[in-house]
Image (cartoon, rainbow, N blue to C red):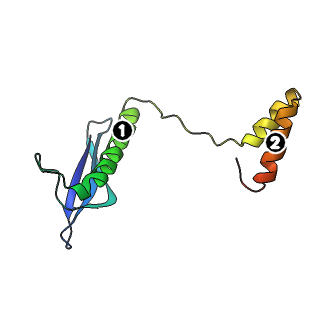
Amino acid sequence: MVTVRYKKLSSGKFSAYLDIYSNTVESKGKRNYEFLKIYVGKDYSVPGTRITESDKDNLKIINALRNKRENELNFSDHGYKQPVKINYNLLDYFDQCLAKKFNYKLECLIIHLMRYFPKRDV
């Protein structure tokens, strides 16, 4: 379970953090905190607190991060692994395709990509 909590700072603002509570195999709970370094003007953990215009964007970011951590926690609790993004060089892939079967348009594309992106991976 992931809960958004707020800590009052000496400046009068509130710092948002995630209170992450997860059950282990032995049914003992483990609690972690993740400080987001996002600051708002009020403590929004109390239900019914009106959201100020200046805090709307920050609260959207905070809720998106909370949902992301909740999904990660649910995936790991049920034994699933989230798919890992694979970094694959596009030019290497095109070279492999060109080795299988020659294609003039693909060769031109490779030449142009090498010309405009000589040091960057595409």
Q: Could you tell me residue 73's position as x and y percent?
A: 36, 38
| Residue 73 numbered tag | 1
Kindly check if marks 1 and 2 are in contact, taking CB atoms under 8 A apart as contact: no
Alpha-carbon span between mark 1 and mark 2: 42 Å
Which residue is at 33% across, 41% downward? 67
**Which sits in the foreground, 67 or 31?**
67
Which of the two residues, 52 or 34, is positioned nearer the viewer here? 52
Q: Is residue 36 shown to the viewer in this render?
A: yes
Q: Image height check: is 50 above or below 28? A: below
Amino acid type assigned to the residue bearing label 1 in the image = Leu
- Viewer-closest of 119 and 5: 119
Q: Which element carries disc 2, helix, strand or loop?
A: helix
Determine which residue is flagged by label 2.
110
Secondary element type, mark 1: helix
Q: Position of residue 11 (x, y in %)?
A: 21, 73
Q: Amino acid at mark 2?
A: Ile
Instruction: State whether residue 2 is above or below residue 36.
Output: above
Displayed quadrant of residue 118: bottom right
> Residue extending furthest top?
101
Few, some or many C-alpha atoms within 10 Å of disc 2 (few <14, some 14-19, many ≥20)? some
Q: Nearer the viewer, residue 60 or 21?
A: 60
Q: Residue at x 36, y 43 (%)?
A: 69
Q: Residue furthest bottom?
A: 10
Q: Nearer the viewer, mark 1 or mark 2?
A: 2
Q: Is residue 33 visible?
A: no
Q: Position of residue 91 (x, y in %)?
A: 77, 42
The reply, left or right, for residue 84 in relation to residue 108 is left
Residue appearing at x 37%, y 36% in the figure: 71
